[in-house]
Image (tube, rainbow, N blue to C red):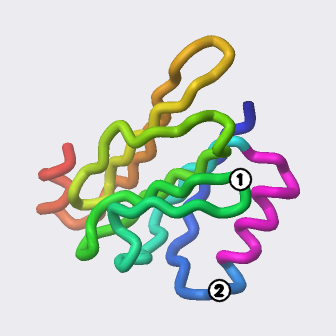
Amino acid sequence: MKLASYNVKGFHNTAKVRALWQWLYTNDIDVLCVQEHNKHECGGQLAHHQGYTSFYGGSMQFSGTLIIVRDQLSPTLAFNHALGCLLGVNIITDDGPLLITNVYGPHASVPRSELW
């Protein structure tokens, strides 16, 4: 299984999004944890794209984490912190269930204290 993590510092540029997906396919990544996606309109949503499920952390106001998982791993949402800083997905492996956790620690003191 191939796992990767990437801080994209925002998906405001569509070329960056296309490049990320191309990299994912080219490298045959099974699970990708993304930080700072900043697509607030996607917070708390699921999306499906060419054999992968994308779990967007947070809500419409706060978003930062994203986990993209190959569909054949049967991913399900485990937890989603309201600030978008902490996201968990359960997957099925040959060795049994596995919990993937993606954490993005906020810089501001109030959200940081709420998370930790």
Identify the residue at horizontal 36%, vertical 37% (top origin): 78
The type of residue carrying mark 2 is: Thr
| Residue 55 locus on image (x, y percent) | 46, 55
- Residue under circle 1? 51
Query: Which of marks 1 and 2 precedes in the sequence?
Result: 2
| Residue 5 locus on image (x, y percent) | 60, 50
Q: Nearer the viewer, residue 96 or 17?
A: 96
Q: How many marks?
A: 2
- Residue under circle 2? 14
Q: Classify the position of the N terminus by image quarter.
A: top right
Identify the residue at horizontal 20%, vertical 49% (top origin): 115
Position of residue 102 in the picture relative to residue 114 (left or right)? right
User: Could you tell me which secondary element the residue under label 2 belongs to?
Assistant: helix
| Residue 69 locus on image (x, y percent) | 61, 46
| Residue 116 locus on image (x, y percent) | 20, 43
Asked if residue 5 shows in the view, the reply is: no
Q: Which residues are magenta?
A: 17-29
For discs 2 and 1, the disc positioned in front in the rendered view: 1
